[in-house]
Image (tube, helix red, strand yellow):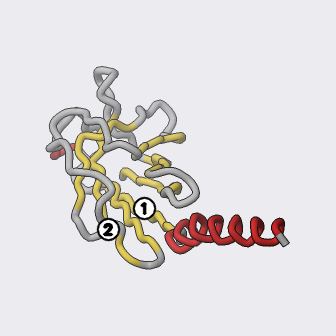
Amino acid sequence: MKRTKQMTILFVLFSFLLIPAVSMAGEYKIQTLATQSNAGVGEGGAEVAASALITVVVTFNGLPATQLGETVGDGTSEVTLPAGWTLTDHTVPPGGCMLSPTEFYNWEDGSYSIRVVPFLGTEGCTWLAGDYHYVVKLEKGRRPVGLRGSGLGSLTIK
């Protein structure tokens, strides 16, 4: 009888700890879409006039996830993305440069913009015609309820 009572108490305590975590768990969805915007073949440098835009939409159980980073930068110098955000570009046109973010903008409706230009760490990097493939990764909070996800995209420069 004593063992059954202990097991019941443990079950109740475990339930109070587990149920909030389970109820907070849900599906985060990260979608990306890139546009050439102002970028043109042969252009480069930290200028809005030479930049492309990556739009990211983040939802949680179908609702906008709005508080995932403060706006930073104005498109005129390289910036560090807000904590938890990572932009990785794996494939660029042959001879092309990787991407440098120059602005992160929180539209406060679950959508975010990342302004990019050809890599600023090497002088002379310019846009080449072709596809630039990238991954936007987002990691916020701790498991099991933290946000973990990524979105794959392609930016085409013509």
**Image quadrant containing the N terminus:** bottom right
Give the residue number, with chain letter if any, for mark 2.
Answer: 110
Residue most toward the front? 2
> Could you say which quadrant of the image residue 116 lies in?
top left
Q: Indicate which disc, 2 or 1, sits on the residue closer to the N terminus.
A: 1
For image coordinates 29% across by 52% down, the residue present is 69
What type is the residue that disc 2 sits on? Answer: Gly
Element on which disc 1 rests: strand
Above/below status of 24 relative to 129: below
Is there any visible trace of residue 147 in the rendered image? yes
For image coordinates 32% across by 23% down, the residue present is 121
Is there any visible trace of residue 136 in the rendered image? no
Above/below status of 111 relative to 77: below
Residue 157 placement (x, y as % from top left): 37, 50
Q: How many marks?
A: 2
> Could you say which quadrant of the image residue 67 lies in?
bottom left
Q: Going by the image, does 21 lie left or right of 34?
A: right
Q: Going by the image, does 141 lie left or right of 123?
A: right
Residue 37 placement (x, y as % from top left): 25, 56
What type is the residue that disc 1 sits on? Answer: Thr
Above/below status of 57 relative to 123: below
Q: Which mark is residue 32?
A: 1
